[in-house]
Amino acid sequence: MRFSQLLIPTLKETPAEAEVISHQLLLRAGYIRKLTSGIYSYLPMGLMTLRKIEKIVREEMNRAGAQEVLLPMVQPADLWKESGRLVKYGPELLRFKDRHDRESCLGPTHEEVITDLVRNNVHSYRSLPLNLYQIQTKFRDEIRPRFGLMRGREFIMKDAYSFDATEHGADETYQKMKDAYSRIFDRCGLSFRAVDADTGTIGGSFSHEFMVLADTGEDTIVICKECDYAANMEKAVCVSSEPDSSNELPLAKVETPGKRKVAAVTEFLKISADKLVKTMVYLADGKAVAVLLRGDHEVQPVKLQNFLGVNEVELASDQQVFDATGVPSGYLGPVGMKIPVVADLEVTKMKNFAIGANEKNYHYIDANFDRDFQVEKIADLRMVTSSDQCPKCGGNLDLTRGIEVGHIFKLGTAYSEALNATFLDKDGQEKVFIMGCYGIGVSRVAAAAIEQNHDKDGIIFPMPIAPMQVIVLNLGVNDEKITQASESLYSELEKQGVEVLLDDRDERPGSKFKDADLIGIPLRLTVGKKYVKEGVVEIRQRASGNVTEVQLNKVAATVADMIGNT
RNA sequence: CGGGGCGUAGCGCAGCCUGGCAGCGCGUCUGCCUUGGGAGCAGAAGGUCGCAGGUUCGAAUCCUGCCGCCCCGACCA
């Protein structure tokens, strides 16, 4: 393809609206343009990259035995009523009425549609297992779209759904998908980890997220430095300390005038934060519940939410705390607490700690669990910290940022039961399908790849997902010899099946070099002065900056070699 | 939805406080010149100053309402 004829509107300056590097570079390199908040047009270069990613996804999905389908984007609301998600999914599901006043919605995901398809067309265990996938535009009316392709409202997703006859089979399918995903992200040249994750609104029994490691990621993940343990913060298991074996001292009430925050109380009492238990009040679906936590720990809201079995937890305001407990916030404690109390596991290991006395300006010291108070339930409710130990091997943990590019769920029978999707098993019994679902944010992969591969000059695409493999710079469009060499090189490479972009624009060399760096094509061939003088073409690798000069007739072979090796 | 910021040429911005000819840089177009890291000179095109209303002799500027965009938070594959 010729640069002069392609729509590649590169920008010299960074658009003000772009905050993260992938967004900035996608705009500057002419890959995408915004239509409105969270909704983007893909220009030729952007689309080429998406197609590259899709190709890898298709190959690996097909290899894993999945079949490609294409499901409707517009879906009847009735189907969502049937699954119970019309309400549960919330305003993120874009709803509208058609001309006949029929309630419809734009598909944010396709569990309902696929389950409907399968229940109507698959009736026997003989057809199982079955794994169907599609690559399609999804629409989710995100509360706050941001960071360009990282969190759009409209985005391209590969979603797959599996149907198995047995638990064992479903687990095997899940593992197959996990392996396929690892191969996909490997082939995309990404540095990633598969982490234990919460199942969220999709539901199901367990799941893994595939996280690309990047500082601009929206999620924090915890990874073990010594073994392969990795988990989302919402799921990371906190290993509690050995129980403190000190002798229990008598409970004593002390005056702590105006000391409310952990830092103020511990300073006043001359103790460290790990010798204090704080009492946090949360509203769980509107009902107040107190959570006990070591002073230097934080509540992990999703753990709390799942533990309590509620849809929503929210930290109570000072006023709400007072209304619920009759105690001003800052002096709350478990002794004589009016609302239900749950405790983080770590609290049960502590001895002789300080707590609020449920009375303004007073705390207790040398409180002890069980002796001085009881709680309703105990669980791992806190946020893991970098000083925690790996639950698997006891090694040191690292907290790092990640971009979620894939998420796989073992759904179990949640949808097949809701939609009554059944098959006849070997034994003649009617059974519900055991399902799994598996998503990849294709457009997000492109953004994640850029977050991970760029420098001050622009994008550095890994070869497998670069829009093109090679760019040829004709530095003398008005010089017959240079132009002739560029053209013959261009057509020779194309003949060999190399994806090549010829910069045949009448621009000065500087602009061509800058643009080539910006758009991130892995190999750059320069035909210019040196060709006229010495008959050589310069080959430069975008990633390493390594330069080699070779005679014109050897270029194609050298390039083919380099592509094979990247 | 809460908090903050912004909206002036394709892009980046100044002008607004203190009302009085619509500006700058880059880009675009034409010509000359130049050709290995976003050159130079000369000329040109391009604006409903987000929209609506108000105040005023006069509004990009002051007031009111609305719309849109970005960031933080809550929320979310």
Image: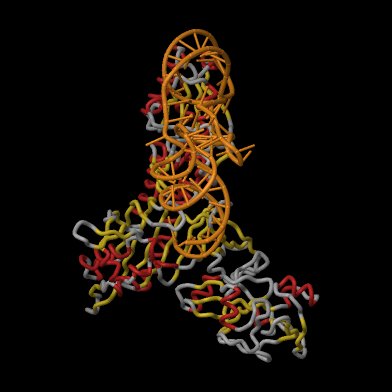
Residue at far right of view: A270
Q: Quadrant of the N terminus of chain A?
A: top left
* Picture residue at 68% right of the left edge, 91% below the top: A371
Horizontal and vertical percent position of residue A236: 56, 68
Horizontal and vertical percent position of residue A404: 49, 56
Q: Is residue A205 above or below residue A136?
A: below
Q: Is residue A370 above or below residue A463?
A: below
Horizontal and vertical percent position of residue A150: 47, 50
Q: Nearer the viewer, residue A299 or A210?
A: A299
Q: Nearer the viewer, residue A334 or A255?
A: A255
Q: Splitting the image into 4 quarters, where does residue A270 fall?
A: bottom right
Report the side of A44 relative to A462 (left or right): left
Horizontal and vertical percent position of residue A193: 53, 57
Query: How did the renderer colour the structure?
Result: secondary structure
Inspect this view and state whether residue A6 appears: yes
Q: Is residue A130 above or below residue A506?
A: below
